[in-house]
Image (cartoon, rainbow, N blue to C red):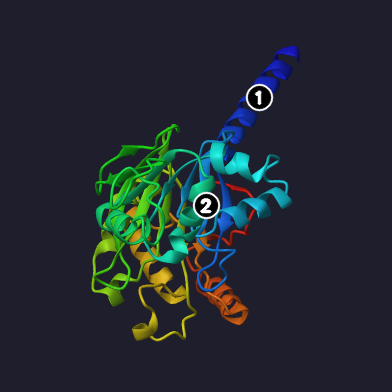
Amino acid sequence: MKFFGSLLLCFLLISTNVFSQKDKSSFQVVPLGVKGGIDEKNLSAYLLAPSNTNDFISLDAGTINAGIEKAIEKKTFKVSVSEVLKKYIKGYLISHAHLDHVSGLIINSPADSSKTVYATNKCMEMMENHYFNDQTWANFGDAGLGFPLKKYHFQTLNLNEETPLTNTTMTVKAFPLSHVNPFESTAFLIKSENNYALYLGDTGPDEVEKSNNLRDLWTAIAPLVKAKQLKGIFIEVSFPNEQPDKFLFGHLTPNYLMKELHVLEDLAGKGSLENFKIIITHLKPPAKNIAKIKDQLKTQNDLGLKIIYPEQGKKFEL
């Protein structure tokens, strides 16, 4: 009897360990801004760090200060705005140079600490020539026009090449996206140990953009989905299905998102997206459109996706 009791205890301990490992999160996310459109206090910016660390990289930087304030208000951070800005945020990954994705970085640069800004070549050229150019704004970088103040290191990312993210244990690989073809946007595949998260900047569907960029991205990440190493995908849905193709301006609807994710499932294997986390970004006001988008995604979710609508300042895990 004693033997069977010991055996049962061992089984319970092993089972508990297996389930705790299975449920263990790999990343923590603090949204500083979650919308597209006109709300300048709540524009695209997501802090991502390995779990149990404060080594955050900012995925885009539309809203920074107001988002940190909201996170402090929600008790996500228990330090000052300055502490989060200067010490917690280790760098910025900028998907493209539209103002709703970079305005927080620009405005907060005088109060920021030295760190790296990462972007692909065309995006970095726009940042240097049109923003940090000593005319529109002081050049806080270490390259470009005017007098470089060298607070930020401007690091150009080569596509499909893994790059270490300075002062973190993470790496990033950039992939091209089409956002009102031929304007470029970027997807970032972030790696921490053997776990991954994928963030897409603004993107239109391949069908409308006459592009293969999304299919190429899905092909690249399908093995990670199949191996359950990819913990979630941040992807935009800006308009409800009623928006005509000619007025999408390089964005997705629920219908086009599901079409694209069906392509991913075909590549990764049937059922591979069951309970997979899809984080919906860049919802554009008005509120009635956002409500419509959510209803349409709920109705069209035939893949069993776990759809997450991030809330400004509220932490969640991947």
Image side of residue 167 versus residue 312, left or right:
left
Is residue 139 among what the camera can see?
yes
For disc 1, the neighbor class at 10 Å (few under 14, some 14 to 19, many from 20) is few
For disc 2, the neighbor class at 10 Å (few under 14, some 14 to 19, many from 20) is some
Q: Is 3 or 286 nearer to us in this picture?
A: 286
- Residue at 31% x, 55% y is 128
Image side of residue 71 versus residue 210, left or right:
right
Residue linked to disc 2: 108
Image side of residue 139 versus residue 52, left or right:
left
Residue 123, position as x, y percentages in the image: 31, 57
Q: Amino acid at mark 2?
A: Asn
Q: Quadrant of residue 91?
A: top left
The residue positioned farthest toward the right in the image shown: 1
Where 67 falls versus 28 (above or below)?
A: below
Q: Quadrant of residue 78?
A: top right
Residue 69, position as x, y percentages in the image: 66, 52
Q: How many marks?
A: 2
Q: Amino acid at mark 1?
A: Leu
- Secondary structure under tag 1 reads helix
Residue linked to disc 1: 13
Image side of residue 131 versus residue 125, left or right:
right
Is residue 277 among what the camera can see?
no
